[in-house]
Amino acid sequence: MYKRIKLFFLCIVISLIALSGCIEEDSNILSIGNTGFTGDSLEITVADYKLVDSFETMNAFNKPIYYYPPEGAQFLLVYLEATNVGTDKTPSDTITLNKDLISSSDVDTPILSYSGNNLEANDNIILYRSSDSYSDKIYSVSSINTHYLFALFDKNHEPKFKGYGNVYPNITKEGWIAFSVPNNIDLTETHIKVHGLTWAF
């Protein structure tokens, strides 16, 4: 009888330990709008997000030109804020969106995770389509990096987040980054990872 009671309490203790581990793991995932702090003295916030069907710019006649993602996709825009709360200048590639321009493979790029996919903010090469304001007829199809397409063409979402590096203390950089995602993406199962921190949508 004593052994059974001892075994019963041992099972309870093991269950509580396992549960506390799960709680601790979940507590490390932030919600959109919350601020996280890193071990290298960065304060990062994923402040907002939105899904959009196109990017827009103006042509020489001040008429809009629209840039669409591939069929079945849409653009997910995420607003980041990063502040150096330490005492030293940050490294040059603390958070970067132009990994293809940097020789190092250890640069830190925001990553969107969904359905087992890890999508880097600067590494989402897509075939985008464009049309003018006079009709919805697609007149051009080109291949470009999603982030660069967004940074070059869209004028409605400013500022753009261009990365964070060589930044002195108490300086904040903020702005939008872009991903091309499926139309039917389940945001409740989607996370964005920035410099070791994770946010759930």
Image (cartoon, helix red, strand yellow):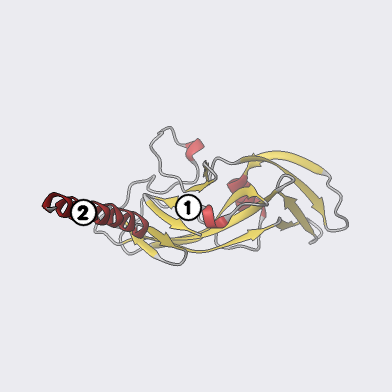
Q: Where is residue 114 in the image (x, y as percent from the top left)?
A: 53, 47
Q: Residue at x 41, y 49 (%)?
A: 95
User: Element at badge 1?
Assistant: strand
Nearest the eye: 136 or 83: 136
Q: Residue at x 50, y 47 (%)?
A: 113
Nearest the eye: 21 or 45: 21
Q: Position of residue 1 (x, y in %)?
A: 14, 52
Q: Which amino acid does label 2 sit on?
A: Phe
Give the side of residue 119 with respect to residue 39, left or right: right
Residue 66 found in image quarter: bottom right
Q: Which residue is drawn at 73% across and 51% down?
A: 67
Residue 22 found in image quarter: bottom left
Residue at the left extreme?
2
How would you rate the neighbour count of disc 1 (Cα within 10 Å): few for under 14, some for 14-19, many for 20 or more?
many
Q: Is residue 48 above or below residue 88?
A: below
Residue 8's mark? 2
Tally of numbered tags = 2
Q: Which residue is drawn at 40% across and 61% down?
A: 30
Q: Which amino acid does label 1 sit on?
A: Ile
Q: Is residue 69 above or below residue 53?
A: above
Give the side of residue 139 with respect to residue 9, left or right: right
Residue at the bottom extreme?
33
Q: Position of residue 59 (x, y in %)?
A: 77, 56
> In the rendered structure, are the residues bearing label 1 and label 2 in contact, judged by CB atoms less than 8 Å apart?
no
Q: Where is residue 63 in the image (x, y as percent from the top left)?
A: 80, 60
Q: Distance between the residues labelled 1 and 2?
A: 41 Å
Residue carrying label 1: 192
Q: Does residue 163 appear anywhere in the picture?
A: no
How would you rate the neighbour count of disc 2 (Cα within 10 Å): few for under 14, some for 14-19, many for 20 or more?
few
Comparing labels 1 and 2, the label whose residue is closer to the camera:
2
User: Element at badge 2?
Assistant: helix
- Label 1 vs 2, first from the N-terminus: 2
